């Protein structure tokens, strides 16, 4: 500790990167598992979020304290070595404390520690690239970025955001003078993200937060606002980087919105409430008599023929659902915007045109349904419940064990959560 408060405050701001773990967990709350009894209308993730945040909080507080204690416990004669190798401090600690067993063990322990840290850094890079891809895709779907950024490749990944998310960090690393500069850039971005999240939650009255939660959030918000200003004052490179990002991002946003024909207008409160009411009435579909069938298929499989036969037999409506799987992690539900069209998807159009033609020949009303989703099982369940279908027909999974292990079996996930009043037919 130093005598002056300004020095101690600046030192505290310098270690603010430890908050990045908490911020990462906060950004994942939108995709966490709901508590038992919770719904999407009234979501509660207290159980999952508590487990995740406590683990990260213990790691941040105790882990950082133990690491600092380990460094301060080394002999003063090693100070030049610590200052020279500050970037691989964990390797130095492993070598020094491992040498108490034997010098050879210390060297091996240091190498093993370096490999583990390297793998963790690769994981962090992968997480950052995935988050950047999701950000570009979400903003493109919401009209905040050019529409081509939302186009997907055959694997369900936006290919332009993938290129940008990979090349942009490489350029930043190449033009940065040293590692400390990269840390400064990261710190001001992380703190700024947390400040925006907290400020938005405090001002959003619809969240229904109690006074204790608001008090903690407000105090944390004020502290981090001063931290952000301190970073901007003491880290000019970071300030310049953020200004460039904001100017470039807002310019690209304005250009994309103008190309899309969007304009900003000012309306009085009465007219705004008329044009965009807060609550829209629920529209209930007036379905034709007879049982309704929903079939979900990714190709021209036998389950489509079976669903057509059942719809003709029961004189009901046949809904054909095609789910384009999106391999992007988003912090919450897909943004609203221009609805995807199955006519623009080659595989979906092949199925839909074939089923519509077969329906006309057999006197069956066929309704094509097309959607893009990062979780096909959840989408199928939502569509089944929303349409109130009587029968849900699925084709048996033809995946190898590795893919089923990594991505999960859609049929199994649907079977576990499908309401009891909807019959499930697995055809294969």
Image (spheres, helix red, strand yellow):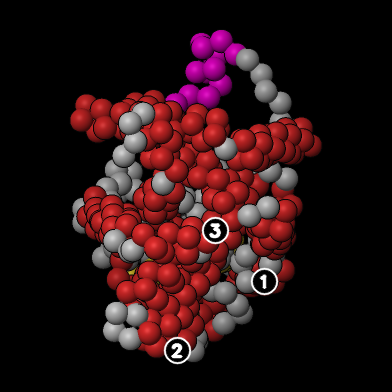
Up-down: is 299 above or below 325? Answer: below
Task: Decide if residue 12 is in sight here.
Answer: yes
Contact? badges 1 and 3 (CB < 8 Å): no
> What residue does disc 1 label?
154
Residue marked by disc 2: 401
C-alpha span from label 1 to label 2: 21 Å
Q: Please tell me whether mark 1 sits on a helix, a strand or a loop.
A: loop
Depth check, front residue: 266 or 196 = 196
Q: Which residue reaches farthest front?
A: 77
The image position of residue 341, as x and y in percent, is 66, 55
Query: How far is the residue under mark 1 from the one under mark 3?
Result: 22 Å
Question: Callout 3: helix, strand or loop?
Answer: helix
Residue 8 versus residue 329: which sits nearer the camera?
8
Residue displayed at 54% across by 74% down: 297
Is disc 3 surrounded by few (<14), some (14 to 19) or many (20+) residues within 10 Å?
some
- The residue segment tinted magenta is 267-285
The answer to whether marks 1 and 2 mark residues whose Cβ atoms lie closer than 8 Å is no
Left or right for 270, reference 76: right
- Residue 89 location in percent, x, y? 44, 64
């Amino acid at each position: 500790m130093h005598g002056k408060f300004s020095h101690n405050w600046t030192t505290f701001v310098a270690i603010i990167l430890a908050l990045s773990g908490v911020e990462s967990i906060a950004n994942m709350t939108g995709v966490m598992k709901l508590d038992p009894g919770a719904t999407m209308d009234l979501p509660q993730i207290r159980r999952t979020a508590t487990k995740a945040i406590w683990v990260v909080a213990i790691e941040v507080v105790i882990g950082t304290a133990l690491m600092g204690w380990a460094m301060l416990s080394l002999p003063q004669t090693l100070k030049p070595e610590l200052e020279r190798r500050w970037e691989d401090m964990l390797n130095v600690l492993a070598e020094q404390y491992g040498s108490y067993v034997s010098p050879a063990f210390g060297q091996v322990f240091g190498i093993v520690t370096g490999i583990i840290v390297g793998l963790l850094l690769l994981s962090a890079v992968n997480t950052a690239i995935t988050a950047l891809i999701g950000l570009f895709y979400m903003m493109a779907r919401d009209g905040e970025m050019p529409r081509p950024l939302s186009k997907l490749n055959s694997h369900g990944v936006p290919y332009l955001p993938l290129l940008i998310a990979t090349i942009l960090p490489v350029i930043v690393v190449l033009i940065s003078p040293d590692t400390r500069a990269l840390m400064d850039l990261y710190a001001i971005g992380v703190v700024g993200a947390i400040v925006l999240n907290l400020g938005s939650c405090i001002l959003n009255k619809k969240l229904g937060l109690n006074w204790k939660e608001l008090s903690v959030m407000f105090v944390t918000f004020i502290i981090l606002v001063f931290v952000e200003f301190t970073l901007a004052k003491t880290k000019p490179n970071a300030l310049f980087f953020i200004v460039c990002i904001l100017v470039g991002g807002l310019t690209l946003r304005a250009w994309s919105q103008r190309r899309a024909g969007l304009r900003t207008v000012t309306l009085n409160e009465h007219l705004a409430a008329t044009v965009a009411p807060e609550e829209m009435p629920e529209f209930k579909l007036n379905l034709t008599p007879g049982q309704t069938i929903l079939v979900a298929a990714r190709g021209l499989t036998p389950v489509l023929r079976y669903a057509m036969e059942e719809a003709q037999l029961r004189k009901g409506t046949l809904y054909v659902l095609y789910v384009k799987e999106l391999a992007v992690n988003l912090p919450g539900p897909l943004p609203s915007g221009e609805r995807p069209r199955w006519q623009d998807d080659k595989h979906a159009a092949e199925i839909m045109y074939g089923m519509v033609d077969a329906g006309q020949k057999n006197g069956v009303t066929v309704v094509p349904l097309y959607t893009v989703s990062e979780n096909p099982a959840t989408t199928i369940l939502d569509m089944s419940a929303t349409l109130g279908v009587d029968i849900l027909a699925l084709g048996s999974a033809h995946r190898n064990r590795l893919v089923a292990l990594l991505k999960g079996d859609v049929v199994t996930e649907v079977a576990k959560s499908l309401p009891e009043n909807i019959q499930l037919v697995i055809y294969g």
